Amino acid sequence: MSFGSIFEAAGVRGYLHARRLGSSSWVGVGPDEPVVLASVVKVPLAYEFARQVAAGLLDPTDRVQASAADRLGGSGSAGFADDVSYSLRDAALLALSVSDNTAADLLFDRVGVANVRSLLAELGLSRTSVIGPPRELLRTIMEDTSAGVPLRALDPLRTSSTTPREMTALLAALWGDPGPGAQVLGWMSAQVSWHRLTAGFPPSVAVSAKTGTMPGIRNEIGVVTYPDEAAYAVAVFTVGGAETLRRPDIDRAIGDAARAAVDQLRS
């Protein structure tokens, strides 16, 4: 079954780009279509943070406090009942491992949205846009819900967005950077969500990945490394299934499509 038909069987529109790292080989479906970033935005955020640390601009041990005013709800400190403090380095880990929105907000405050945008421009990712931290996305959702209009947060032309091809380019930059890039991939390897990309590969294959989820939006990008050391950057974005956040069939389709794409590159 082709990766395109895998999406169709799950009842979603799927967009995918996969490339063998270190070569020009790639496969895809709709690789240049605009897609919603959702929490995948935390990957360039963490990369800019790691670069600033390497440049001596930030101390990774500096602490931030997640107070009631910062908590957006959700995983990690975003859903805590009480105030907590942690280092900037642990904020990056929380943002990538459990997709902690509050940790990402606090990290954006230190790193700077403008600096994340500058990083994207430096990498040539001209079709990737960042409107702001998670709290800004939540603000647009609340405003649009109150006004009874379509959510900007679900429209790639009006929110933080990218293309699958640009996300594999970002992953290639991480993979080719033995300093900050390797640090980010290490945080991504600690992600607790194994039900999308990771589910498509056997345990012998290492996966460093980051999900993104909103109503009707399910994404994941990651670097997949085989025991023979061949590595692949994969970006999968799906649209559909907005009736519930729990759609294990769509989650599995993301992993199956990623595996089919990598298998094609390995054949």
Image (cartoon, rainbow, N blue to C red):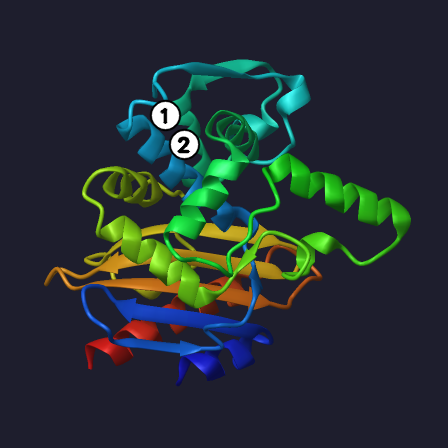
- What residue occupies the far right of the structure in this picture? 147
Q: Position of residue 100 (x, y in %)?
A: 51, 34
Residue depicted at 10% across the width and 63% down the height: 228
Q: Quadrant of residue 158?
A: bottom right
Amino acid type, residue under disc 1 in the picture: Arg
Q: Is residue 127 above or below residue 52?
A: below
Residue depicted at 64% across the width and 68% down the height: 240
Disc number for residue 89: 1
Kind of element beneath mark 2: helix
Q: Quadrant of residue 206?
A: bottom left
- What residue occupies the far left of the structure in this picture? 228
Residue 44 in view here? yes
Q: Residues within 10 Å of mark 2 (few under 14, many from 20)?
A: many
Q: Position of residue 33 (x, y in %)?
A: 54, 72
- Which residue is under mark 2? 92
Kind of element beneath mark 1: helix
Q: Residues within 10 Å of mark 1 (few under 14, many from 20)?
A: many
Q: Is residue 68 above or below residue 227?
A: above
Q: Quadrant of residue 78?
A: top right
Residues marked 1 and 2 touching at CB (< 8 Å): yes
**Image quarter (top left, top right, bottom left or bottom right) of the N terminus:** bottom left
Residue 98 in view here? no
Mark 1 and mark 2: Cα distance apart in space = 5 Å
Disc number for residue 247: none
Q: Position of residue 183 (x, y in %)?
A: 27, 37
Residue depicted at 19% across the width and 70% down the height: 23
Amino acid type, residue under disc 2 in the picture: Ala
